[in-house]
Image (cartoon, helix red, strand yellow):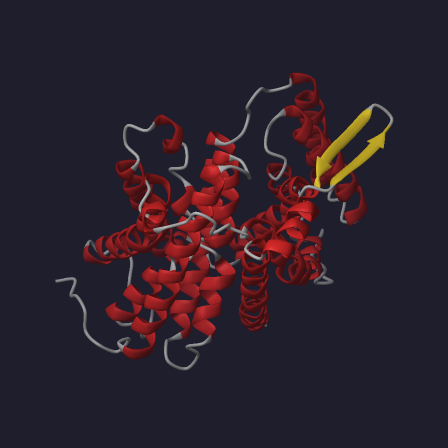
Amino acid sequence: MARVQFQSALQDFFKLESASSILLLGAAVLALLMNNTPILSDIYQGFLHLPLGIRLGEINLDKYVLLWINDGLMAVFFFLIGLELKRELLEGQLASLQQAILPLLAAIGGMLVPAIIYTAVNWGQADSLQGWAIPAATDIAFSLGVLVLLKGIIPDSLRIFLLALAIIDDMGAIIIIAAFYSAHGLELTPLYYAGGAIIALAVLNMLRVTRITPYIILGVILWVCVLKSGIHATLAGVALAIFIPLRTKGDDTGHSPLRHLEHVLHPWVAFAIMPIFAFANAGVSFVGVSLATLTGAVPLGIMLGLFLGKQVGVLGFTWLAIKFKIAKLPEHATWMQVYGVAVLCGIGFTMSLFIGGLAFGNEGDYANQVKLGVIAGSLLSAVFGYVILRYMGNQAFIKTS
């Protein structure tokens, strides 16, 4: 029964992500068109820089729309990622080492090699080196969206492999953001209050409180405190997700606060938050852009990291894991199909743009170069990955012995 429910949930997830990828693409294209049309460009930029403020007693939050999207809406996105990670670790594809080891090693390779390539291209340039993590991410919605176009051509085991790999990739991105892109000018007092909110969440969890409202109230408090502390506010979403109970006491009714929240939030994130983020962040301006711009250190490092680094890292670490009998090839999959999936992992988009914003800010030359590199690398990966899986998937590629 549990297996049937899991398979049904997995099918719903794939359907949702594939539909979301179409909307995500449309939002990105709309942003590009608006920001490169003289009349619409002013409207686009005016919307993103519209100031919005909230004041509650001594708490004053003044930001413009773009920052509310990147700090606020994306905290909900990270909250959902945290819920998915917790569920997968406790009862999903990452619940056992045997299940997790292949996508885990593939994800490590897929983060490590792109970072090395970006660093090599930008070596000696202190300002641009801080973008080393930008090509380390994989966009779940777009990559799974491409696989849905290939339904019936590739085995389901490869879709599950890519899903697990992308989830682990997100976990790695969260760790990278927490370790390298937060805590600039820390404010200790809000951090103490954030610690108090986390303790309160832990107490709720230990008391097996299953009502969602107290968790959400404490989560909002935690978000404000983390935002004011100088640590990136989206990490509050992950911290909150850790304490949402997966199972209720006795677990007889089948009610799960975590699964309920995941079910409620997933459509909102897929069809609203991610497209809004894409619209706000993908609007690269092509004014003054030439081939020389694309071959600059930052866009070239990102593009090569996503398109070459991802496929080399994912395929290489997968081959090593199977060569040394640490793991097995996904069921009914060929090596050429695994290679095609490795290429698709180079679709970085959402998380790559987000990390790029943390590394270089949301405005200026570097911000535009980041968008160019991410869009070029992701587009190359999507097209080549699709072609490989659609037309060459059943061909032999490499042997492990």
- Furthest residue to the right? 57
Q: Residue at x 29, y 45 (%)?
A: 113
Q: Residue at x 29, y 56 (%)?
A: 311
Q: Is residue 370 left or right of residue 206?
A: left
Question: Would you place residue 198 above or below residue 7 in this image?
Answer: above
User: Would you identify the image quadrant in which residue 23 lies?
Assistant: bottom right
| Quadrant (top left, top right, bottom left, bottom right) of the N terminus | bottom right
- Furthest residue to the bottom? 152
Q: Is residue 268 visible?
A: yes
| Quadrant (top left, top right, bottom left, bottom right) of the C terminus | bottom left
Q: Residue at x 49, y 68 (%)?
A: 145
Question: Would you place residue 126 above or below residue 251 in this image?
Answer: above
Q: Position of residue 337 (x, y in %)?
A: 30, 70
Q: Looking at the picture, tell me which residue is in the foreground, 238 or 207.
A: 238
Q: Looking at the picture, tell me which residue is in the foreground, 317 or 72.
A: 72
Q: Is residue 2 visible?
A: no
Q: Position of residue 9 (x, y in %)?
A: 59, 68
Q: Position of residue 382 (x, y in %)?
A: 39, 64
Q: Is residue 66 left or right of residue 10?
A: right
User: Would you identify the image quadrant in which residue 159 lies?
Assistant: bottom left
- Furthest residue to the left? 401
Q: Is residue 42 left or right of residue 285?
A: right
Q: Looking at the picture, tell me which residue is in the foreground, 225 or 83.
A: 225
User: Would you identify the image quadrant in which residue 236 lies?
Assistant: top right
- Furthest residue to the front? 38
Q: How many marks?
A: 0
Q: Is residue 169 left or right of residue 76?
A: left
Q: Position of residue 138 (x, y in %)?
A: 43, 53
